[in-house]
Image: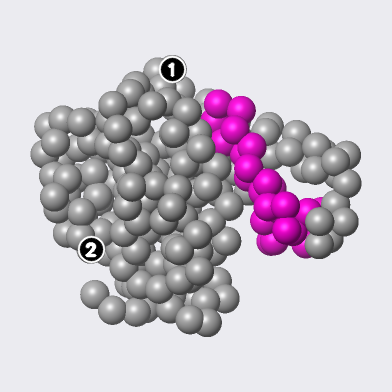
């Protein structure tokens, strides 16, 4: 495969090949960052014949520039802040809290929509493969890593199709392995490296999760 990536499923199939050493292992679980990470992760889980679940993470956008991540929150009460952005933009604690509370509502809504009554998987002593459809600043992935780390896994692997080199370098000390197929520069935005980067609905995410759960092991 080469850039641009055809779509998220193609990216997942390519990543499954790159992660082949984890195939069929009972101690491995794939956790997708919704929404965009789910079709990527579904192909990885299918290719490796391992379970799939979701890790709920929400970016905390800067008040005057929502696309800029000043931090992120994740399931389990994890919050990661980008101190450089907070200081550089002079963002007050009150403004941070306001954004965090708004995003917490959406995180809880998605938790109900995607997980329903399914219990959170036991990650103790597991090799956890965290998957998204790409990374920009890495803030949301950082929050996901912290949330997983709190549950005593044996290993954490980050697997993404595309990310800027500096983000990959920043994440490498935080996990056991980062698998990234493409590290183009200059980067700009994740979507520019895909032919099809259409947004997913909650219903599509739910369908992918149910399809993988129903797949024969």
> Residue at the location (46% across, 55% down)?
171
Q: Position of residue 176 (x, y in %)?
A: 33, 47
Quarter holding the C terminus? top left
Report whether 166 appears left or right of 48: right
> Residue at the location (23% across, 44% down)?
45
Q: Is residue 31 visible?
A: yes
Q: Position of residue 210 (x, y in %)?
A: 31, 33
Report whether 186 appears left or right of 194: right
Q: Residues within 10 Å of mark 2 (few under 14, many from 20)?
A: some
Chief SS of the magenta region: strand
Report whether 75 appears left or right of 12: right
Q: Position of residue 112 (x, y in %)?
A: 53, 26
Magenta stretch: give its range.
60-86
Report whether 60 appears left or right of 27: right
Task: Inspect the magenta stretch and tell me whether residue 64 lies in it.
Answer: yes
Q: Which mark is residue 117?
A: 1
């Amino acid at each position: 495969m080469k850039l641009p990536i055809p779509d998220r499923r193609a990216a997942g199939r390519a990543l499954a090949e790159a992660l082949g050493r984890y195939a069929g292992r009972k101690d491995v679980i794939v956790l997708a960052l919704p929404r965009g990470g789910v079709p990527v992760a579904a192909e990885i889980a299918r290719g490796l014949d391992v379970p799939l679940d979701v890790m709920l993470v929400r970016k905390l956008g800067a008040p005057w520039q929502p696309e800029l991540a000043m931090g992120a929150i994740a399931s389990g009460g994890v919050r990661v802040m980008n101190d450089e952005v907070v200081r550089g933009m002079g963002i007050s604690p009150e403004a941070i809290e306001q954004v965090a509370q708004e995003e917490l509502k959406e995180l809880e809504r998605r938790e109900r929509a995607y997980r329903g009554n399914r219990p959170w998987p036991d990650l103790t002593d597991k090799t956890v493969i965290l998957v998204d459809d790409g990374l920009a600043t890495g803030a949301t992935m950082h929050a996901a890593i912290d949330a997983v780390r709190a549950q005593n896994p044996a290993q954490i692997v980050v697997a993404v199709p595309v990310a800027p080199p500096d983000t990959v370098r920043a994440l490498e000390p935080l996990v056991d392995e980062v698998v990234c197929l493409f590290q183009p520069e200059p980067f700009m935005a994740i979507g520019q490296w895909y032919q099809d980067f259409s947004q997913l609905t909650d219903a599509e995410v739910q369908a992918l999760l149910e399809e993988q759960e129903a797949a024969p092991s």
